[in-house]
Image: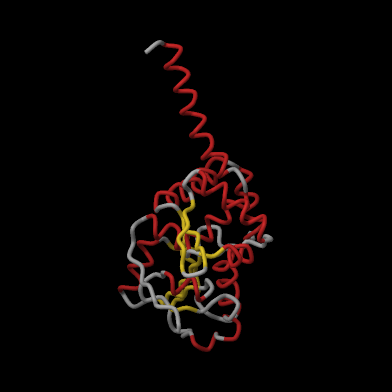
Amino acid sequence: MSRAKTEQLQSALFEELARVAKALGNGKRLAIIDLLVQRPRGVVELAEAAKLNVTTASAHLQILKQVGLVTTVRDGTTVRHHIGSIDVAALYSQLLTVAAAQSAGVDTAARRALGTDDIEEIDRAELLRRVEAGQAIVVDVRPEVEFRAGHIPGAVSIPMSELPDRLDELSAEREIVVYCRGAYCAFSHDAVRLLTSNGYRAMRLNDGILEWRVAGEPLSVESSPG
């Protein structure tokens, strides 16, 4: 094969790789992947969760589907969208890690979105140690449908929207570790602020279900009611 032909084929290869990168190069599409890591969803539900109209959500999904980052499965009359594989979740997780480490803008945006107060955090290894020792209660503050689709074993579900009215279900005698979708999920930050302001010893897992899945940690799954 000639050198010119080889260079042409290599150029075509990089263009295909760029298609995948371009599919990720949109904030709304990243938000869609973030949501699909939690559980498969139909387009109407996904549009509502991502704060998009259905037409726009469908267009974003089509771009992600064209490069294999999203797949579809028919469930009766509903078409449910899934992340393409656990490797897609790993790619997204690594993107978050690299962006946080390399871009000062990400850190600034995260502080604006999540707050700048000093919230105590622990990592996965410390969480498991404290649970094994009976020192901590683990609370999942995502919506209940996401909890049922997969959660940290032993965790209890108290969605952030319900937490203010369910504080009496928690013991003030034990540490409370809260977690949500991932490192940049606001639910866990808000939950820690609420709990500590009400006298509880609370902290957040420094990542969430995204990173838990990518690490291959076990998940508990519950059947949907009905």
**Depth order, front residue of 40/170:** 40
Outermost residue on the front side: it is: 77
Please give the count of numbered marks on the rendered protein: 0
Determine the residue positioned at 43% across, 74% down: 138
Determine the residue positioned at 55% across, 86% down: 166
Image x and y of residue 158, in percent: 51, 79
Specify the quadrant that holds the N terminus: top left
Determine the residue positioned at 54% across, 73% down: 143
Specify the quadrant that holds the C terminus: bottom left
Image x and y of residue 125, in percent: 35, 61
Q: Is the residue 177 above or below the residue 215 in the image?
A: below
Q: Is the residue 103 above or below the residue 209 in the image?
A: above
Q: Is residue 13 left or right of residue 160?
A: left
Q: Is residue 36 left or right of residue 48?
A: left
Determine the residue positioned at 51% across, 69% down: 77
Q: Is the residue 189 above or below the residue 56 in the image?
A: below
**Depth order, front residue of 179/197:** 179
